[in-house]
Image (cartoon, grey):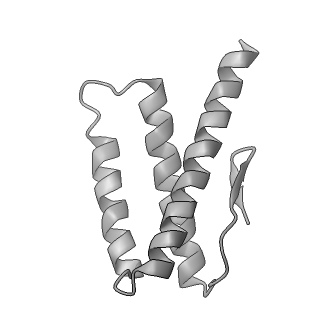
Amino acid sequence: MNESVDWKDIKYTEIFEQEIRGLERRRKSDPNCTVTDLEGTLEHLYIMDGADWYGRGQLQDIIMAATIAAYEFFINQWKNGSDAPQEAVWNGGQATS
């Protein structure tokens, strides 16, 4: 039973950190990338998350939750004036930098 919880946490952290790295790269390399762009993507992610008509399954739910959390975290950091790399980690259900 404990192993099933561990793989979920590991996958969540992996996806969260992967998304943060991708968002950092995008922000650095794309001068047209704005908070508004990312908020638009986040809105679409919320819609996709709510459109789980047939069920995605546990793995896809974890991926969606981690992706949404990464976007929320990154946007919040950007709005608060953080230009430094996020280096965010998922620690016991909390994103920290």
Vertical order, 8 against 90 (above or below): above
Image quadrant occupied by the N terminus: top right
Quadrant showing the C terminus: bottom right
Q: How many marks?
A: 0
Residue shown at 56% from the left, 61% from the top? 20
34, above or below 17, in the image:
below
At 72% from the left and 17% from the top, the residue drawn is 3
- Left/right of residue 96 with respect to residue 72 in the rendered view: right
Relative side of 93 to 33, left or right: right
Along the line of sight, the residue nearer the viewer: 16 or 5: 16
The residue lying at 25 percent from left, 24 percent from top is 54
Q: Dividing the picture into quarters, in which one does residue 13 lie? A: top right
Q: Is residue 71 left or right of residue 30?
A: right
Front residue of 2/83: it is: 83
Residue at x 61%, y 88% (from the top left corner): 81
Residue 47, image x and y in percent? 28, 51
User: Residue 91 in the image: x percent, y percent?
Assistant: 75, 48
Find residue 67 and report its horizontal and vertical position in percent. Answer: 47, 51
- Residue 41: x percent and y percent? 33, 63
In this rendering, the answer to whether 75 lies above or below 47 is below
Q: Residue furthest front?
A: 29
Question: In which image quadrant can residue 44 be found?
Answer: bottom left
- Residue at the far top: name it: 1
